[in-house]
Amino acid sequence: MIESFEELENAITALEDYIVQLKQENVDLKKKEAVFTSTIEDRDREIRQLQQALKNNYVTNDASVSAEFDKKIEGLIKRVHSMTAKKMTNSGI
């Protein structure tokens, strides 16, 4: 009977040790999860910043291209106008 109690006590001690080990693993996993979550949030933030920068760059480039295009059109209109004025002057109109 004493042997049965000793076996039972050893089994309970082993279970307690296993529970302590599982609790420590749980704490370690929660720490890892917090690190991973933080890393994912940082990457998401970086991606959003890059997307915004890309959008801003596109808008800036689009405005720049539009301004350059407008200048070229103005230049062409002035050249055509001056060519037309010269023809009118040369033809006596």
Image: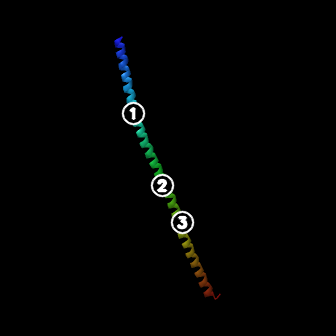
C-alpha span from label 3 to label 2: 21 Å
- Apparent side of residue 70 relative to residue 44 in the rendered image (left or right): right
Q: Residues within 10 Å of mark 1 (few under 14, many from 20)?
A: few
Q: Earlier in the sequence, mark 1 or mark 2?
A: 1
Label 3 sits on a secondary structure element that is: helix
| Image quarter of the C terminus | bottom right
- Apparent side of residue 92 relative to residue 48 in the rendered image (left or right): right
Q: Earlier in the sequence, mark 1 or mark 3?
A: 1
Q: Residues within 10 Å of mark 3 (few under 14, many from 20)?
A: few
Q: Earlier in the sequence, mark 3 or mark 2?
A: 2
Location of mark 1 (residue): 25
For image coordinates 57% across by 78% down, the residue present is 78
Furthest residue in direction top, as rendered: 1
Furthest residue in direction bottom, as rendered: 92
* Residue 44 horizontal/vertical position (percent): 47, 49
C-alpha span from label 1 to label 2: 36 Å
Location of mark 3 (residue): 63
Q: Nearer the viewer, residue 55 or 78?
A: 55
For image coordinates 34% across by 12% down, the residue present is 2
